[in-house]
Image: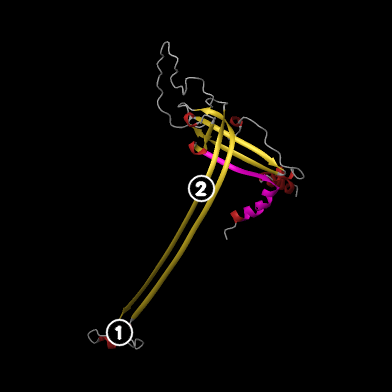
């Protein structure tokens, strides 16, 4: 009997119920600002890189090889710099499929005359010309339709966490804001090219490679909208 409270505590901690119970009567707490590279789930990105080439040094030259402008560029270029990510998605899809298949078949076989031996057939066979008759019919109808419409507009600042050998930048943007008892969480990560950063230090989400965009939250309204964790477990476990 002593193991029952322990199992209950482990079960509640595994589904996050303890953290939710600790926030009863007050709004959910925000995550402290921290270095994303220090998190346990963060991993540096490795991507195919071109072969490194030595840049020749030119004496008495004001222009630096690889520079994007004659004067200092104020856009993000190194680890720790901030760049604003613009997410504007307005996707829609409408797919409709219909399939109809019909098949009908019939077969018949008989032996009305066979060298006069048809008289030797059992008396149960009244008409030898109708020894075997078969028929089959098959009909199949299928319809399917998918309608999807998504519209997301976000604007949040991110930090350059890594500079790849070819000059591309790995950025991580996170933002949290709380309205009453609802906490909204925004996360954007990906790889961008320095030349895709606009003059106002912004970059569009469709210029990001390996983009990961998450927009969600938690709070009282989300708890009501989501099914109970017990129901979710039953939906996964039950085979019927």
Pick whichever, 144 or 95, lies toward us. 95
Locate residue 154, reporting x and y percent.
Answer: 58, 40
Locate residue 70, reporting x and y percent.
Answer: 47, 20
- Colour pattern: secondary structure
Q: How far apart are labels 1 and 2 at the CA level? A: 67 Å
Locate the C terminus and report the quarter of the image it occupies: bottom right
Q: Is residue 220 left or right of residue 240?
A: right
Identify whether 14 is placed above or below 106: above
Q: Could one spot residue 61 in this view of the protein?
A: yes
- Find out whether residue 222 is within the magenta segment: yes
Going from the N terminus, do you reach mark 1 or mark 2 first? 2
Q: Is residue 64 left or right of residue 36?
A: left
Give the residues in magenta. 211-234
Identify whether 125 is placed above or below 21: below
Counting the numbered discs, the total is 2
- Find out whether residue 181 is within the magenta segment: no
Q: Residue furthest right?
A: 25
Q: Could one spot residue 42 in this view of the protein?
A: no
Identify the residue position indicated by label 2 in the image. Answer: 91
Pick whichever, 123 or 132, lies toward us. 132
Task: Report helix, strand or loop for mark 1.
Answer: helix
* Residue 32: numbered disc: none
Pick whichever, 78 or 118, lies toward us. 78
Q: Residue at position x 55%, y 35% from top?
A: 85
Identify the residue position indicated by label 1 in the image. Answer: 129
Tell me whether the residue at label 1 lies in contact with that at label 2, contact meaning CB atoms closer than 8 angstroms.
no
Q: Residues within 10 Å of mark 2 (few under 14, many from 20)?
A: few
Q: Residues within 10 Å of mark 1 (few under 14, many from 20)?
A: some
Locate residue 99, reporting x and y percent.
Answer: 42, 63
Q: Is residue 72 left or right of residue 217?
A: left
Locate residue 216, reporting x and y percent.
Answer: 62, 44
């Amino acid at each position: 009997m002593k193991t029952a409270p322990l199992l209950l505590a482990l079960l509640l901690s595994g589904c996050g119920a303890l953290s939710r119970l600790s926030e009863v009567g007050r709004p959910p707490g925000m995550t402290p600002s921290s270095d994303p590279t220090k998190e346990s789930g963060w991993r540096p990105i490795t991507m195919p890189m071109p072969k490194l080439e030595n840049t020749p040094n030119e004496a008495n030259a004001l222009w630096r090889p690889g520079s994007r402008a004659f004067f200092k560029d104020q856009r993000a270029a190194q680890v720790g710099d901030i760049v604003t990510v613009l997410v504007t998605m307005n996707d829609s899809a409408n797919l409709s499929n219909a399939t109809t298949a019909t098949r009908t078949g019939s077969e018949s076989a008989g032996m009305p005359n066979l060298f006069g031996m048809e008289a030797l057939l059992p008396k149960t066979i009244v008409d030898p010309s109708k020894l075997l008759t078969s028929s089959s019919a098959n009909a199949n109808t299928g319809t399917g339709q998918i309608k999807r419409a998504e519209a997301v507009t976000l604007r949040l600042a991110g930090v350059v966490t890594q500079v790849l050998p070819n000059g591309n930048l790995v950025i991580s943007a996170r933002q949290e804001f709380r309205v009453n008892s609802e906490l909204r969480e925004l996360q954007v990560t990906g790889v961008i090219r320095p030349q895709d950063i606009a003059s106002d230090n912004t970059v569009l989400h469709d210029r990001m490679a390996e983009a990961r965009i998450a927009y969600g939250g938690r709070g009282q309204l989300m708890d009501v909208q989501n099914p109970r964790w017990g129901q979710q477990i039953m939906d996964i476990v039950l085979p019927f």
